[in-house]
Amino acid sequence: MYIVVVAGEPGYSKEYHYDTRWIDNPPPIFETFDVYYRGRLEYDTLYVDQLINVMSYDSLILGPGGVLVIEEGGVLNFDTLCYFGVEATEENPAWIIQNGNLHQDPFAVLEQTHRRWDDEWEHLNLDLNCSDLSLPEHVTDIEITSRVYQLTLHFACHNDPVEASQLTLEGYFRFAPCEEWINLGYSMVHGRVTTETDITIDHCTFAARLNDWNASAVNANADCEITNSFFFGSYVSPAIIGLNDDGVVRYSGSYAADDNQFLGFVVGEGMIYEDPLFVDPEDGDYHLTPESPLIDAGDPDSPIDPDGTRTDIGAFFYDWRQHNDVDDEDIAELPQAFEVDGPWPNPFNGVTTVQVAVPQDETVEMVAFDVLGRELGQVYRNHVTAGSISIPVDLSDYPAGVYFLQIRMGNESRVVKALLLK
């Protein structure tokens, strides 16, 4: 038997069990798509009590408030025909909860390339008791709690860097080998990250838990660049270890028994080794107090914070706009609209720069096209805070000629022309 759940109207609440109870409590709607079914789990809960082969469905979507509970012995088995997506919201995230003493991938042990899903998951909470989890190449606002010793994350790689933004990680995690860089940004880690692939760690806060006294915060078995990040608590010393001896850390810091926390890293400028003055670290609140030395102490070349000031260090910026004693002249005016300026210089020889005004926190991407309209590839993609950003454009590997750069933010896009000279 193949099953799928399609939710009722928002606010409708019902639980479904894939076992003998399924006969007495079937889902309210089945939607047929050709010979396949489409399923959407929204404001409902589905309990998976045994093996489900999701092979007769065109898609299975976790919508706002959808809860997927995988009981002991339960497995979702996807094949090449099934598409799995997440369409939740920040106000109503989706959930995947794994119960019992489980040690298998909750989405079955299948090769990543055999699955179809969105390039991006947003607003999803996962509470897992497995050793491996596959994720798409772009994840935003994802909370993962691991209940095993170490959970390995397998990111999809499609010739672009992996973008992992606004993550909350609880436990020990391993980033599996990937052909592209992983950009971990604006994330909170309670525990440890071990990476087997090249990684940038930017605007992250690492906090040791009570049982992390003998663990490091980062084990980098590949190239690692750390900026605007802070490491806090009773990690073992050194807490950040780079086995390649060529890692770079700058405009970051740690607060521990000694300052020798970075082994195998070139320690650059802007480092801070003092109490970060978090709001309430004992209760898990790592926001900054007004007296924190991390405020306005980040890399001056990074995009400004949403309040218009120099970027802060850590996962959470301090919003000066909430305080009346701030001189308005000290705060830069934020952009009111999505605007693109440049490229400059133009014409250029190899590398040029495009300025983008971003009125709110948003994902910005740039794609290059030749004069015939053929897409050359993605030049840039990142989740940025409100402000003005500079995007370097490197076309040195392409022949001289006219190129078009399309810059996208949300539902808006702009196109600029660039003349490459050789």
Image: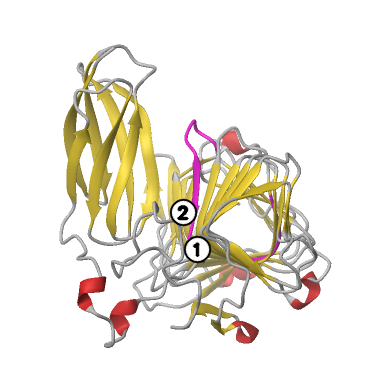
Q: Is residue 167 left or right of residue 106?
A: left
Coordinates of residue 228 in the picture (x, y in percent): 51, 59
Q: Nearer the viewer, residue 244 or 191?
A: 244
Q: Which residue occupies the foreground of this view, 179 or 312?
A: 312
Residue contact at pointers 2 and 1, CB within 8 angstroms: yes
Q: Residue under label 2, please give it.
A: 121
Q: Is residue 368 left or right of residue 217?
A: left
Based on the picture, tell me whether residue 162 belongs to the magenta stretch: yes
Magenta span has 276?
A: no
Which residue is pictured at 22% across the width and 34% down the height?
344
**Picture layout, residue 90 above or below residue 137:** below
Residue pictured at 46% horizontal, 70% vertical: 316
Please tell me whether the stretch drawn in magenta is mainly helix, strand or loop: strand
Residue 286: x %, y % from top left: 55, 77
Q: Which mark is residue 196?
A: none
Residue 70, position as x, y percentages in the image? 65, 64
Q: Quadrant of the C terminus?
A: top left
Is residue 257 found left or right of 31 in the rendered image? right
* As drawn, 370 above or below 161: above
Q: What segment carries the magenta color?
A: 157-174
Outermost residue to the right: 214
Identify the residue position indicated by label 1 in the image. Answer: 124
